[in-house]
């Protein structure tokens, strides 16, 4: 009897906690049939689209105020406005965690605000406090969910690539492993070709 009572008390305590309350709440939730599921998903899709629109509208409003107040004013006033914009754009991104990364990349692309990794927020400096109308027009025309960051340039420099191959072959030729097949004469000729045409790649 005492063991049963102890378990009952523990269960009551569990349900009274936040975690226990959440468990009991979802245990009693009403499940949906096929037609209700389809309707519910449609509702989520509509709310999601509206949420994205709202985020873009708010962000563009912040940028509009910022660019309007950027002008022939004192540098101090411009910096104050930029700091306000940095704060509000950070708050907006944090308010939509599922869109946070995409939104912050959009902010970084269209503004010169600096991301403070330690504080996890945008900050404005004297050098990044100005926001021009042309950038506002570009930002307004391209919402964050359509924005794609340009791929990072990764050029292939033939001289450098040849030098990497030569270095690797030279090292393995000096200390060969079982199964290696390195033609030292071809390696020497490859080094001559590299030096002849790509003398600056070292």
Image (cartoon, helix red, strand yellow):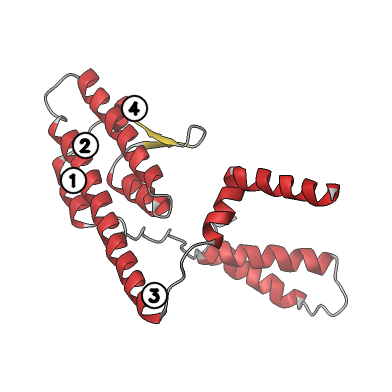
Image coordinates for residue 82, horizontal then vertical, percent: 27, 30
How far apart are the alpha carbons under marks 3 and 2? 46 Å
**Eyeballing the image, is 159 above or below 69?**
below
Q: Are marks 3 and 4 in contact (CB under 8 Å)?
A: no
Q: Earlier in the sequence, mark 2 or mark 1?
A: 2
- The quarter of the image holding the C terminus is bottom right
Q: Is residue 157 left or right of residue 86?
A: right
Identify the residue position indicated by label 2 in the image.
Answer: 131
User: Could you tell me which secondary element the residue under label 2 belongs to?
Assistant: loop
Label 4: how many residues lie within 10 Å, few (<14), some (14-19) or many (20+)? some
How far apart are the alpha carbons under marks 4 and 1? 19 Å
Q: Residue furthest front?
A: 1
User: Could you tell me which secondary element the residue under label 4 belongs to?
Assistant: loop
How far apart are the alpha carbons under marks 1 and 3? 40 Å
Identify the residue position indicated by label 1 in the image.
Answer: 136
How far apart are the alpha carbons under marks 3 and 4? 49 Å
**Eyeballing the image, is 32 above or below 84?**
below
Identify the residue position indicated by label 4 in the image.
Answer: 125
Q: Earlier in the sequence, mark 4 or mark 1?
A: 4
Q: Nearer the viewer, mark 3 or mark 4?
A: 3
């Amino acid at each position: 009897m005492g063991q049963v009572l102890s378990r009952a008390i523990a269960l009551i305590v569990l349900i009274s906690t936040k975690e226990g309350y959440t468990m009991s709440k979802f245990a009693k939730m009403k499940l949906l049939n096929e037609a209700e599921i389809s309707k519910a998903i449609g509702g989520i899709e509509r709310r999601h689209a509206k949420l994205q629109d709202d985020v873009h509208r708010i962000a563009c409003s912040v940028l509009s105020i910022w660019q309007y107040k950027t002008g022939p004013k004192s540098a101090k006033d411009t910096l104050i406005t930029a700091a306000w914009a940095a704060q509000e754009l950070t708050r907006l991104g944090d308010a939509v965690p599922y869109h946070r990364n995409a939104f912050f990349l959009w902010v970084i692309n269209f503004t010169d605000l600096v991301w403070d990794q330690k504080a996890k927020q945008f900050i404005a400096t004297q050098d990044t406090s100005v926001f021009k109308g042309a950038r506002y027009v570009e930002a307004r025309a391209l919402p964050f969910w359509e924005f794609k960051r340009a791929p990072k340039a990764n050029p292939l420099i033939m001289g450098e690539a040849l030098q990497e191959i030569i270095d690797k072959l030279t090292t393995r030729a000096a200390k060969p492993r079982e199964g290696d097949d390195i033609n030292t004469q071809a390696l020497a000729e490859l080094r001559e070709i590299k030096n002849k045409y790509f003398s600056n790649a070292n």
